[in-house]
Image (cartoon, helix red, strand yellow):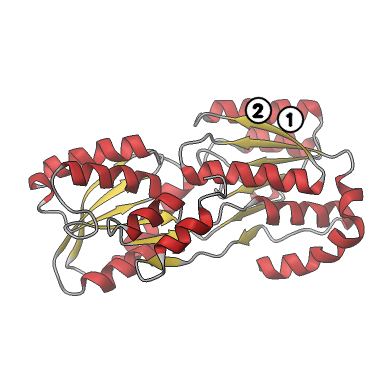
Amino acid sequence: MFKTLMLTTAAFAVSAGMALADGKVIGFSQIGSESGWRAAETTLTKKQAEERGYQLQFSDAQQKQENQIAAMRSFIAQGVDAILIAPVVATGWDAVLQEAKEAEIPVVLLDRMVDSDPSLYLTAVGSNLVHEGEVAGQWLAATVGDKDCRIVELQGTTGSSPAIDRKTGFEKGIAGHDNLKIVQSQTGDFTRSLGKEVMESFLQAENGGKDICALYAHNDDMAVGAIQAIKEAGLKPGQDILVVSIDAVPDIFKAMADGEANATVELTPNMAGPAFDALEAFWANGTEPPKFIQTESKLYTQADDPAGQYEARKDLGY
């Protein structure tokens, strides 16, 4: 679907790209900077806008929905040409999205979905979040085999689409494997510091960690924090406790290269490229993109040259 859209819009980029960009202002409401992946998404979005000649109005919501709604209303009042938003939670967007629609300002969702009528936004760019969790679960099931495995889970921000869908997908991935059981599950809010704090409580609750077979974290930053907690508890992450997470940020590859993490599922931070392609086709002749433009996800393990992956990614804004 993404490739089809890229082919559809390529001709416009060649013949009219800068003409379309001329004078256009894009509002970008970012969740915040809770993770390395989020920082990379912000950096790449700003870079894409600059390369295409757009003026980007950036707003950091600091993980608060009310800040995002206020930013969107400010963008609408300014009369921007389009709005990009990475929504902090899935619900509560109907009114402000309706306001944008009435102002004829196309809205593109980045990396997260909302529980609103799809007619209220132009498109959403993201990965299949359920699939990401399922890939992580399937990897763990295949790795553990018939061994009994008590799993602890670090969830993302409560109510966010990644937290909901990555949990659903992981449970789907381990379904039918009665030897795998999630015994502890709590939000770490996608942050490294809270991931460490919550993992410490898991370790205390599970015989100092000796009863834990594996950690599943909804993002790499929480996993990195948890790895530190595991080491401080006198255990070896990646060996005593298997670690699988999602995002594929540089630090998780460093941990994998050190033998302290086992697997990660990639979420590309370049959501803006497909978003701007869709907007340019829409502005050129009213082409309606699909309501969901799916990016590629990939499983990486310790066998996939994690040191090389770290070097390749470390300067991408993470």
Residue 219 in view of the camera? no
The CA distance from mark 1 to mark 2 is 6 Å
Amino acid beneath label 2: Ala
Q: Quadrant of the N terminus?
A: bottom right
Q: Confirm or deny contact between disc 1 and disc 2 (CB under 8 A).
A: yes
> Does 157 sit above or below residue 153?
above
Element assignment for label 2: helix
Towards the viewer: 59 or 157: 59
What label does residue 71 carry, if any? Answer: 2
Number of numbered tags placed on the structure image: 2
Q: In this view, does 175 lie to the left or right of 272?
A: left
Towards the viewer: 166 or 56: 56
Q: Is residue 162 left or right of residue 192?
A: right
Residue 181 in view of the camera? yes
Q: Residue at x 52, y 39 (%)?
A: 91
Amino acid beneath label 1: Phe
> Does 272 sit above or below residue 57?
below
Badge 1 is on which residue?
75
Indicate the position of residue 233 as horizontal and vertical percent values.
Answer: 14, 43
Indicate the position of residue 113 as horizontal and vertical percent values.
Answer: 56, 49
Element assignment for label 1: helix
